Image (cartoon, helix red, strand yellow):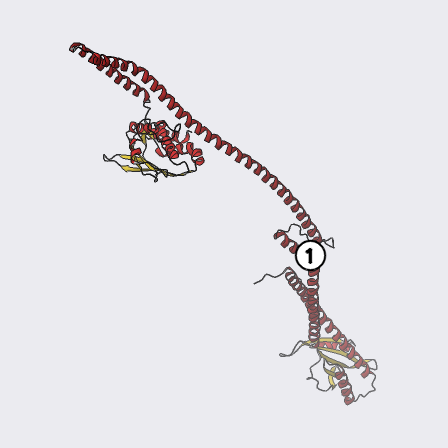
Amino acid sequence: MRPLKLHTKTTLLASAITLAVLGVVLALTSVRFAQRVRDQQKELAQLQADNLADHISQMPAPRDPEQLARVATLVHGSRPDAVTVRVWERVGGVFREVAASAESRQVEEVPDDVKAALRSGLPTRVVEPRTEGDDNSLYRVFAPVWENGRVSGAVEVIEKFDSAPSIAWDYGRGALWLAALAVLLITLGIFLLFRHFFYRPVERLLGAMEHVRGGDLQAQAPAPARDDEMGTLTREFNRMLTRLREMTAEREAQSLALERRVGEATSELAERNEQLEEANLELYQTARRLTELERLAAAGQLAAQFAHEVGTPLNLISGHVQLLLASREHDPEAEHTRLQTISQQIERIERIVRRMLDSTRPEAGEHAPLDINALLRRTFDAAAPTLDASRVRLDAELAPGLPPVGGDADRLQQVFINLVNNALDAMPEGGGLRVTTSLEAGGDGAGRVVVDFADTGTGMTEEVRAHIFDPLYTTKKRGHGTGLGLVVVRQVVGEHGGQIEVESEPGRGARFRLTLPAAAQNEPDSIASVSERVATST
C-alpha cells in the first residue's frame, strides 16, 4: 500500500477538524434554534388566543355558538400546529365548553390554577405531556373573554411542538450540506496551496537532487520567487551544492597533485630499484670473479709452493738415479745407500703432499641443527639478481616440516651457491632451475633430507660426468672456471656425512641429488635459533 502524500494527510486532518467543529456548532445551534422556534410558537399561540378573546369580547351578547365554532375553526386552520381551538363560557364559578373548532380533541377540564388566574383576568399557559405513543408535548394557552368589565369566559388554544424539531432538522440538514461544501472547498484550497507553494518547489529540489545523484554537480534548483520557508530551503540547498562543488574541485586538485607526486616517487623508486638490481648483479658477479681469482691465486700459490718444496727432493732423487745409472761398478752397499736416500726423499715428497692437502682443507666449522629450507631461501635471495639477468627461471618446491640437518650453514650455503653457478654456466641462453626438498627414510630408521638441483642446460656426456669431481677438471672456457667448484661440493657434503649423485645426458640438462642425514632432535632451542639466523641473515 502506497503511503499517503503530505497534502492528503493535511487535507484529511483539516477536513476532520472542520467536520468536528461544524458538527459541534450544528448540534449547539440546532438545540438553540429548536428552543427559539418553540418560544416563538408559544408567543404566537398566546397572541392568537389573545386576539381571538378580544374578538369574542367585542361580539354582542348573546353569542351564537355556531358562529363561535366557525371563528374557532377559522383560527384553527390558520395555525398548522394547532390541535384545538375551544371557547369556554363562565357560568357562576364554573367554566363550560361553548364551541370548538372542527377535529378538536376531547374536552379536558380546565386546571384549577388556570381557573383562578382567569377569574383574575390573567392569561395562562399550561404545558401538558402528550399521551403515550405521541411526540413531544402539548401547549395549552388560555385567554380571558370580557363582558361588561368582568370575565365571562375564556379562549383555549392547544398547539403541538412537533414542528420545532422538524424545523431544526431541516436547518441542520442544510447546514450539513454547507459543511460538506465547505470541506470540499477547504480540500481544494489546501491542494492548490500545497501544489503551488510546496509541491512545485519540492519537485524542483528533487529534480536537482536526482541530477546530483547522477554525478552532475553543476545542477542547481531554480531560484525561489518567494522569501518563505521553501525559498530558504532552496537557497540553502543551492549553497550546499556550491560548497560541494568547491570541495570536489579541491579534492580533485589534491588528488591530481598526489597522483603526480606518487608518479614521480614511483618513477624515482623504479629507477633506484633498477640501479640497485644492477649494483647487486655487478656485486654478485664481482664477488664470483673474486672468488674464482682467489681460488686461482691460491691454486697458483699452492702450485708454486708445491713445486718449490717438491723440487728439492726430486732433484736429490734424480741425482741419485743418475749416479746409479752412471755407475759401472757394482757396489751393493753404495747402491743400497743410494736407494735408501731415494726412498727417504719419496717419503718426504709424500709428507709434503699430505701437508699441502691438509692446508687446503678448511677447518671444520661448528655443526648445529639447521633448517635446510631457510638456508635455501637465503641462497635464492642472494642469487636472484644473477638468475634474472641470466633469464633463468627458478622453481622451488620446498617440503614443509623437514627435520633439521646438522652442519655448518656457511659451508652448506657454499655448496648450494656452487650448484646454482654450475647450473647458470650450463644455461647460457637461459632456462629453468628446479630445486626441491624431501624426506626419505633411512635404512637405520633415521630420516635423510634430500635436496635436488635440476637444470635444463646442455647436459654432460658420460665421459665428462665421470671426471666432474676431479680437481682442476673443467669443460668451461679459459677464465670461466677453475675445476674446483664441484670438488668443494663433494668435499663439504662428505664432511656432513652426506652423499651426492649426478644424472645427466647431453641436451637434457643435469640433476644433482644431495642426501644429508637429519640431526638428532634433542635440542629444540638450538634448532630454532639457528633457523632464525639462517632465515634473517643476508
Which of the 4 image quarters holds residue 519? top left
Asked whether the viewer can see residue 87, the reply is: no
- Residue at image coords 33%, 38%: 506
Report the quarter where the N terminus lies: bottom right
Percent position (x, y) of residue 242?
68, 47
Residue wearing tag 1:
201
Dot 1 crowding, Cα within 10 Å, few <14, some 14–19, many 20+: many
Q: Is residue 351 above or below residue 238?
A: above
Percent position (x, y) of residue 108?
69, 82
Q: Is residue 477 above or below residue 354?
A: below
Taking the image as shown, residue 438 lies to the left or right of residue 14, namely: left
Percent position (x, y) of residue 434?
37, 38
Q: Identity of the amino acid at label 1?
A: Pro
Q: Is residue 341 above or below residue 70?
A: above
Number of numbered tags placed on the structure image? 1
Which of the 4 image quarters holds residue 149? bottom right
Asked whether the viewer can see residue 356, the reply is: yes
State the SS at label 1.
helix
